[in-house]
Amino acid sequence: MYAIVMTGGKQYKVAVGDVVEVEKLEGEPGTELTFPALLVVDGTDVTTDADALAKVSVTGKVVEQAKGPKIRIHKFRNKTGYHKRQGHRQRLTRVEVTGITTK
């Protein structure tokens, strides 16, 4: 059984026991979170109906707050002497999926 959940404007395929890196969510390690399900697959049974999905709950536990890899940005314009360097590290939250329940 797995589900497609949405958080931070992105969709993730999750199953019970998976650890997923998502964009930063508030919470200390050990905090319980609930995600809305967009699709649930249980064997050959696929659920996409909005009424049925309103009863589905995907829960997870915050494992840790982390940072992604360093991204280096370099802008350059030819023949003008223009160079601009910038770096970025995205803040991430690692979440362990603890359950996919239907009510």
Image (cartoon, rainbow, N blue to C red):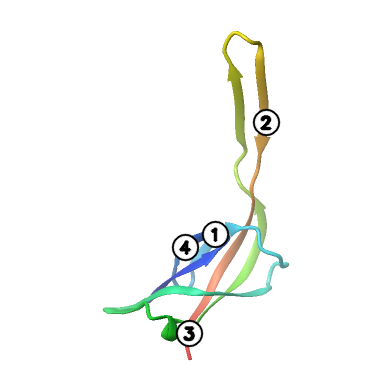
In space, the residues marked 2 and 4 are separated at their CA atoms by 29 Å
Element under disc 1? loop
Relative horizontal placement of residue 76, taking residue 15 as reference (left or right)? right
Please state the horizontal and vertical placement of residue 65, each as a whole percent of the image: 68, 58
Which amino acid lies under the numbered mark 4 shown in the image of this protein? Answer: Tyr
The reply to whether the C-beta atoms of the residues labelled 2 and 1 are less than 8 Å apart is no
Which amino acid lies under the numbered mark 1 shown in the image of this protein? Answer: Gly
Farthest-out residue, right: 28
Residue found at x 48% / y 87% = 55
**Mark toward the start of the polypeptide (2 vs 3):** 2
Which amino acid lies under the numbered mark 3 shown in the image of this protein? Answer: Thr
Element under disc 4? strand
Element under disc 3? strand
Q: In this view, does 34 lie above or below 28?
A: below
Query: Closer to the camera: disc 2 or disc 1?
Result: 1
Residue linked to disc 4: 12
Q: Is residue 87 above or below residue 58?
A: above
Residue linked to disc 2: 86
Query: Closer to the camera: disc 2 or disc 3?
Result: 2
> Residue 9 shows which numbered tag?
1
Residue linked to disc 3: 101
Query: Closer to the camera: disc 4 or disc 1?
Result: 1
Q: Is residue 69 above or below residue 6?
A: above
Q: Quarter of the image for the N terminus: give it.
A: bottom left
Please state the horizontal and vertical placement of residue 36, each as a whole percent of the image: 52, 74
